Amino acid sequence: MSLSLDTVLQVIEIVNKAVDVYQKIQDAPEQMRKIGKRMERLKALLGHLEQLLRKREKRALARLRPTQTEDLLAILEDIRDDSSRVDLLFRKWENDIGPFGLQFRFKTLAQAYFALGSNSEKLASLGDDIDRHRQDVIFYLSMMGCAGIDELLINGIPVQTSPARTVKPNAVAAGLSMAKAQTATRPGGRNSTAKQDQPSRRDYKILFVDPHNLARSVVAEAVMKLLRGWTIMTGGEWRIEVIHSAGFFVKHRSEVVETIKGLSFTHDSYRMSLSAGNRAPNAVPLEAVFDNKSYDYPFKKAIQDEMTSRRSRGLPKDIFRIYDYIMVFTGREHDNMLQLRRALVAEEGKDIAPKGKGRLLHLGHYLTLDGIPREIVDAPKKPDGTDSRENWNFKVSSQIKIGLKGFLRQEMGWKQPAQNAKSGS
């Protein structure tokens, strides 16, 4: 199976079959209806992928690195398999078919689950898988140049494809702020629950990864913990239990040093020197997070002390099994993490990266206005080679913080606390 328009059409055919059956069912339980609704959304997204490839297949696929192409292909294969399961489930329900092909009318929900060879937990897991597929397709549509796919789909606006263009960082920040303000007041917008299922879990684990765990990853960890403190303090709902950061090319506490040494990097420039690690974070980036009036509440000092006392560390071997989300900041880092996952699966088997865990995300995906994820690189240094506080102020407020809020809204169903209550902006 290779990635092409034909591949996508084969997957769409199976998804369409499942959706067609779902739309005929009148009496399905709530869990099955949720799966059906998620399948309808997935069908719409795959339709956009089909249109994109019909218009400019070579150009769209050329945007992806080889490891990303492999990852998207694996996602499509999972969609095909899970959609076949959903199709079978719906057909059994529609035709009242139980064990051994016997046909009878289900009198209770428990009877139905038994007859379908399933249970509430399995159906919930299947629904979560379908929703993850939807988010993965959104991510790759963005990578391939489908502009504003997540925001437009949520609000029911037809998606337009657009070629790559350069957008100035301050324009990105301004545009995102305007979009956020519009969404907050728009019926059915990102903050509305009308069109978007809310995650039920409250134990998500996330990890931020950059090369050496000294700046961007530490800043992202710190800002996310500030957002957690602010949300909980104002009575909001918070769904993330663990927030960590680590460095790809760090030896200290790493369990994958030899694996990384043996990787076939896509480009020579993607390989960096392994550092010893166990170093304090760079001071200026953390000053840009804490040396201001944002989130100026009692929890801030404790988070600042925690972050300034931490030391750089490497990656655990079971990174793709422990964490639900792994966030990187550039396409290079995304590619390197895909390479690492593939190598670990080859060494340890598929259980090292189980389905539904270790979802790899580019934080710049949540900054895009033109369909191309923004590269969040380290802030430019001063002419003398030292860190610039001004540049890090911009990096924190106009890129990392905005990206994290976008992630929380889209993936966690997060609602930003009211600004007129206790502001952390």
Image (cartoon, grey):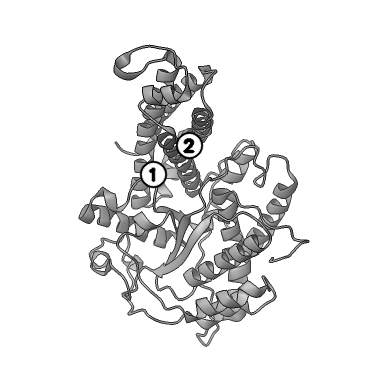
Asked where in the image residue 417 lies, by quadrant, the reply is: bottom right
* Circle 1 or circle 2, nearest the eye: 1
In this view of the protein, can residue 277 be seen by the observer? yes
Q: x%, y% of residue 328?
A: 45, 61
Q: In this rendered view, identify the residue nearer to me: 72 or 2.
A: 72
Quadrant including the C terminus: bottom right
The structure residue drawn at horizontal position 52% and vertical position 30%, both measured from the top left corner, is 40
Task: Report the Cα–Cα distance between label 1 and label 2.
Answer: 12 Å
Q: In this rendered view, identify the residue nearer to me: 256 or 173.
A: 256
Q: x%, y% of residue 349?
A: 23, 51
Mark 1: give few (<14), some (14-19) or many (20+) Cα within 10 Å.
some
Q: Which residue is under mark 2?
A: 49
Answer with left or right where residue 317 lies relative to residue 125: left
In terms of secondary structure, where does tag 2 sit? helix
Q: x%, y% of residue 67?
A: 34, 52
Q: x%, y% of residue 373?
A: 52, 55
Q: How many marks?
A: 2
The structure residue drawn at horizontal position 40% and vertical position 19%, both measured from the top left corner, is 92
Instruction: Kindly identify the amino acid type of the residue bearing the numbered disc 1.
Output: Leu
The numbered mark, 1 or 2, whose residue comes first in the sequence reads 2
Answer with left or right where residue 284 lies relative to residue 133: right
The image's mark for residue 297 is: none
Q: Which residue is under mark 1?
A: 72
